[in-house]
Image (tube, helix red, strand yellow):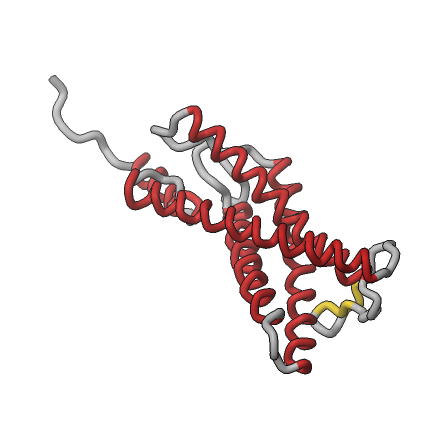
Amino acid sequence: MLRNRRDAFGWGTIALHWTIALLIVGLIVLGYVMTRPNIDPELQFSLYQWHKSFGMTALALALIRLVWWLASIHPVPVAGMTLLERRGSAMAHGLLLALTVVVPFAGWAVASTSTLGIPTLLFNRVLVPHLPMDRSAAAESFWTEAHALLAYGLAGLVAVHAAAALYHHFRRHDEVLTRMLGIFRRQVTSNAHQQPQGHDK
């Protein structure tokens, strides 16, 4: 099942979700490491280039995920969630979706406004053009700070999102986490073929 159903996520959504999640976590860790003081300049330059390459990949996938989300059916919330929980979940997912686009875009703006004018080569192969923005120390400083603050906000939201999923899995014992793993769909299919237990009265 590639596309979503009313009771389950399709493999398209699942693949995009986990690929982007891994990229975002990796980029946050890489961003922290490459900005440490006293790092070897040659290593730092290399890490910056990898950060830009994976960041552009994350941006492309996030845009695909946005289009996919707008064009897809949204599965209904799992049973047992209150109205407040449903609204909070919808807001968190919308904000996560927005930040996965905005954060790498801000990083692209940093590279585009940098006075160094270093080209962005996607995995040392494909030249990514800079955005049509003026290069200046002030603009680079603004976008660098914006990129960092937005990334910290995204990291915090990801942590809360992961904690909520684990809470639902281990405390509430519902399908919030398992259906994003594709397990819920298989359970539904399996249960549909089970015969009712007991005898007619």
Q: Nearer the viewer, residue 93 or 157?
A: 157
Does residue 117 lie above or below 132 as drawn?
A: below
Does residue 41 lie above or below 110 as drawn?
A: below
Query: How many numbered marks does the figure carry?
Result: 0
Q: Position of residue 58 (x, y in %)?
A: 63, 56
Does residue 99 lie above or below 58 as drawn?
A: above
In the rendered structure, the answer to whether residue 118 lies left or right of residue 168 reads right
Q: Nearer the viewer, residue 200 or 32?
A: 32
Q: Position of residue 107 (x, y in %)?
A: 71, 58
In the rendered structure, the answer to whether residue 148 lies left or right of residue 184 reads right
Quarter holding residue 48: bottom right
Quarter holding residue 123: bottom right
Does residue 55 lie above or below 80 as drawn?
A: below
Residue appearing at x 58%, y 38% in the figure: 94
Q: Position of residue 145 (x, y in %)?
A: 69, 56
Residue appearing at x 65%, y 67% in the figure: 51
Q: Position of residue 77 (x, y in %)?
A: 43, 31
Residue appearing at x 62%, y 42% in the figure: 68
In the rendered structure, the answer to whether residue 194 lies left or right of residue 135 reads left
Residue appearing at x 80%, y 71% in the figure: 118
Quarter of the image that includes the C terminus: top left
Q: Nearer the viewer, residue 179 or 49?
A: 49
In the rendered structure, the answer to whether residue 200 lies left or right of residue 98 reads left
Quarter holding residue 104: bottom right
